[in-house]
Image (cartoon, grey):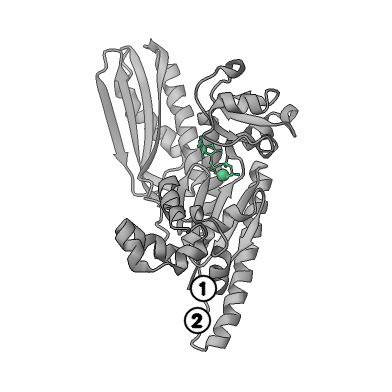
Amino acid sequence: MAVILHIDMDAFFAAIEERDNPRFQGLPIVVGASPHGGLGRGVVSTANYEARKYGIRSAMPISWAYRACPTAIFLPVDGKRYSAVSRNIMAILRKYTRKMEQVSVDEAYLEVNSKLKTKNSKLQLKTQNLEYEEVRKIAEKIKKDIWEKERLTCSIGIGPNKLIAKIASDFKKPDGLTIVQSNEAQDFLDPMPVRVIPGIGPKTEKLLGDGAIRLVRGLRKAEKQKLINKFGVHGEHIWNLAHGIDGRSVEEDREVKSVGRQTTFEKDTKQSGPIIETAFALLKEVFDELEEERLAGKTLTVIVRYAWFETHTSQKKTDYSLSLREAKKLALKLLLPYLTGRAVRLVGVRISGLHLI
Ligand code: TTP
Ligand code: MG
C-alpha cells in the first residue's frame, strides 16, 4: 500500500520576493508583466496572499490587477532566481525518498511505502492509521526543513493516490497539511466542484453544468455510459477520478546524466591564467551542485572554444569518484594543450559517470 504526498509551495514567486525584500513584508505583491500605470499588457504570474485579498490571481491581465490594487508592489519575473530556489527545494525533498516526481517549478509528488502488511482487515485499518501518522510526521519534518533552509512555506496533501494528494495539498493553503485516508477519500471529494478533477477545464465544466452536474458527487452518481457517450474515453476517465480512482504512479525523475557549466568570456582571451581560473570556478559550481544532489562522478570533460568557434572537448575517465581537488588537477592537464596563445572564446567543464553517494 503506497501513500502519496503532494507538496506545493505557497505563492511561490511572490514568497521568494517577500523573503528577499524584507521591506515588502506584509504588503500585497504581484509578480508578472509591468503594469505601466494600468496600461500594461501581459498577465500576473502570481500574487502573494495579501494581494489575493483584492481578488488578484495568476493569469489575470496585469491591468486588472493594477485596477484592483494600484498600491501593490509590482515586480518583474526573475526566473533565474526562482529556478535556483526551486532546485534547492527539490534537493531537500529528494532526501526523503528516491521515489519523487517533480511536476512543476514548485510542486512534487513523493511516494512512501508501507512496510506493514496484513491480511486481517480490522488490523489493516489500524496499520493504515499508524502509517498515515508516520507519514504526517514526515510531512511535518519536510515543512520544517524547507522553512529552516529556505524560509518559505509550502502546503502538503497526503492521500492514497496522486489525485487525492494533489487536491488535499490545495485544500488548506497557505502552510497547510491535509491528510485524506483511502476510506475518507469519497467524502472528501463529493462536495467539491467538478473543476478540482484534473482534466475538467472550463469547457467540460460548462457541458457538465448543462446536465446539472456541478459537484464531484453528481459526477460520481452519473451513469458511466452516458458520460462515455458524451465525452468518449475522457468521460470514463473523469468518472473514475470522481470515484477517487487514480492508477497513475509516481514516476521517478529521469536520472541526471551529467552536471556541467560553461562560460563565454566578455572578451576573447589569450591568457592561460584567466582561462584556468574560470575553469576552476566552474568546477567549484559543478561540485557544489553534485554535493547538493548527493552525486559523484568519475569522468571529467573540458571544453574550449576558440574565437573562430572551433570547439574542442577533451575527456578523462577515471575508475574512482573525482574530488574537486582531483578534478582541478585533471582539468589543468586536459586544458594545457589548448592554451597555446590562441584567442579563447569559451571554456566549459562537465562531470559525468554519475552515481549517488
Ligand atoms: P502555483 O503553485 O499554481 O501558484 P503559487 O505557488 O504562486 O500559489 P499557491 O500554490 O499558493 O496557490 O504556481 C507556481 C508558480 O508558477 C507561481 O508562483 C508563478 C508561476 N505561475 C505563472 O507564472 N503563471 C501561472 O498562471 C501560474 C498558475 C503559475
Ligand atoms: Mg504553489
- Quadrant location of ligand 1? top right
Badge 1 amino acid? Ser
**Image check: 347 left or right of 10?**
left
Vertical placement of residue 309 versus 22, above or below: above
**x then y, percent, for residue 89:** 56, 45
Q: Residues within 10 Å of mark 2 (few under 14, many from 20)?
A: few
Q: Residue 47 occupies which quadrant of the picture?
A: top right
**Residue for point 43% across, 33% down:** 328
Amino acid type, label 2: Lys
Q: Are marks 1 and 2 in contact (CB under 8 Å)?
A: yes
Q: Secondary structure at mark 1?
A: loop
Horizontal side of residue 311 vs 111, given as left or right: left
* Image x and y of residue 55, in percent: 64, 36
Is residue 96 something that shows in the picture? Answer: no
Q: Residue at x 62, y 48 (%)?
A: 154
User: For the view shown, which residue lies furthest in the bottom direction?
Assistant: 120
User: Which one is in front, 259 or 121?
Assistant: 121
Secondary structure beneath disc 2?
Answer: loop
Residue placed under numbered mark 1 in the picture? 114
* Residue on which the image places disc 2: 117
The number of discs equals 2
Question: Can you give x and y, in whole percent of width and height, for residue 39 in the image?
Answer: 56, 17
Cα separation, mark 1 vs mark 2, equals 7 Å
What mark, if any, has residue 280 been given in the picture? none
Callout 1: 10 Å neighbours few (<14), some, many (20+)? some
Residue 254 visible (yes or no) = yes
Tell me which corner region of the image, top left, top right, bottom left or bottom right, holds residue 130: bottom right
Instruction: Place residue 134 in its image quadrant.
Output: bottom right
Q: Is residue 21 above or below residue 230?
A: above
